[in-house]
Amino acid sequence: MKVPEGWSKKTLEDIANVSSGGTPSRGKPEYWNGAIPWVTTAEIDFCEIFDTTEKITQDGLNNSSAKLFPIGTVLLAMYGQGKTRGKVAKLGIEATTNQACAAIVFKHNFCVDYYYQYLRSQYDNIRNLSNSGSQENLSGSIVKSIQVPAPPLPEQQKIAQILSTWDKAITTTEQLLANSQHQKKALMQQLLTGKKRLLDEDGVRFGERWNHSTIGKIGLVKSAGVDKKVVEGEVPVRLLNFTDVFNNSFIHSQDLNHWVTAPPSKIRDCDIRKGDVFFTPSSETREEAGIPAVAAEDISECCYSYHVVRYRINEPWDLNFKAYAFTTPQFRKQVNRLADGSGQRYVVSQDSFRSILISYPDIAEQKKIGGVLKIAENEVDLLQTKLEALKQEKKALMQQLLTGKRRVKLENCYA
């Protein structure tokens, strides 16, 4: 690790007291359900902790290796399932922890927020320090040996202040995104079930009864998939695959980047028209089966894989309405019930798809509903894009500021 002039290199043990917590006996009910917060690694997720799922009593604290750590303690997950190991969090309250958490209490003249940000930026590197055993855990000695830069305290504080401003912008955007997602979900539940009716072009509320039918009676469910392998003598063609459907509400030609080969007859058989609905009939989990997406345009020279089926409705439906009509809780419950999990994947057969019931209004009301929901989705997409941009910009800034590649100007408080 290189540091600029005026900085030094330290280990966490040099600048902080590093310890871990403990777990009171589960066999002692009097040790649990008290008032003292008790943190587990599942709650360490690059955040500030203000509450915990579990709490212990004073007796539990007194009769175990658990310790009460002060506000500002940085917690690092030494082991845990999946991506947990190596994550950090900061205590916004006094709390105890289990033994899987390393508690880092920084000494005087070392800025907690600077080192919290630095350890966040080193997530992948810290994970790579894990022991070589089967669980690949961190340990207290490994955490103590982590090398960190040590800028002068005023510089630490200024860097932390700058990055905190970015964190506030990210948090605000996350809250706006969550609100927009909630509003979109509420609109879908109301509009796609007929509980809320919109106004027509004349300002009169729609009142016609909705149509009720099975999927099979109003359209054609078809599979014409191809393998992902390349076969000599066949024609190169783009492939619409599982992820293209699963990750999108609308399918656009420009977003299809997978290529396979197929005979010309198969390509003709796989024609994709604007308004075709594609489903994921098989998946590794029941929740991922039957996810829909709609072709937003005619797509030529393209095949679809065995892991999607095409549904072409034989009566006029609004394009936007199609994108949401097959996502209601009522539709999802039917898919989940029909998904056969007897093999390695959950599969909804074509006959099962054809039997699913759907309720829908006439085309005029569909257009109104589809338009409102598309506006709501666009707002969600815009906020997601903004949030991702903020995170990427902050990540790039962290790499510059926390390592001294870019220095802050302390006299006028600008970076």
Image (cartoon, grey):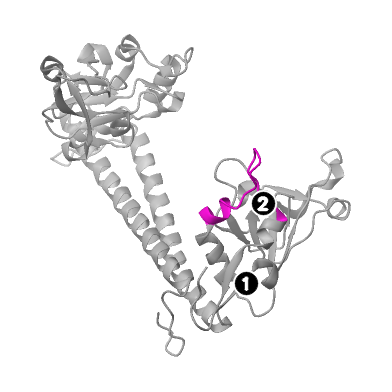
Q: Is residue 289 visible?
A: yes
User: Residue 243 at what x, y percent from top left?
Assistant: 32, 32
Q: Is residue 294 left or right of residue 411?
A: left
| Residue name at image x 32 percent, y 28 percent | 242
Q: Which badge, 2 or 1, is on the more N-terminal residue?
A: 1
User: Residue 179 at what x, y percent from top left?
Assistant: 41, 51
Q: In the image, is residue 244 above or below residue 262?
A: below
* Amino acid marked by disc 2: Thr
Q: Determine crowd level at label 1: few under 14, some 14-19, many 20+ residues with C-alpha closer than 10 A.
A: some
* Amino acid marked by disc 1: Lys
Q: Nearer the viewer, residue 120 or 230?
A: 230
User: Residue 182 at what x, y percent from top left?
Assistant: 41, 45
Determine the secondary structure under disc 1: strand
| Residue name at image x 66 percent, y 41 percent | 133
Q: In the image, is residue 130 above or below residue 390?
A: above
Disc 2: which residue:
52
Assign the magenta stretch its main secondary structure. loop
Q: Is residue 89 magenta?
A: no
Q: Which stretch appears magenta?
A: 123-140
Q: Is residue 237 left or right of residue 279?
A: left
Q: Nearer the viewer, residue 213 or 100?
A: 100
Which dot, 2 or 1, sits closer to the camera? 1
Image quarter of the C terminus: bottom left
Q: In the image, is residue 334 above or below residue 5?
A: above
Disc 1: which residue:
10
Q: Nearer the viewer, residue 238 or 348?
A: 238
Real-space Cα distance between discs 2 and 1?
Answer: 32 Å
Q: Is residue 205 visible?
A: no
User: Residue 336 at what x, y percent from top left?
Assistant: 44, 20
Determine the secondary structure under disc 2: loop
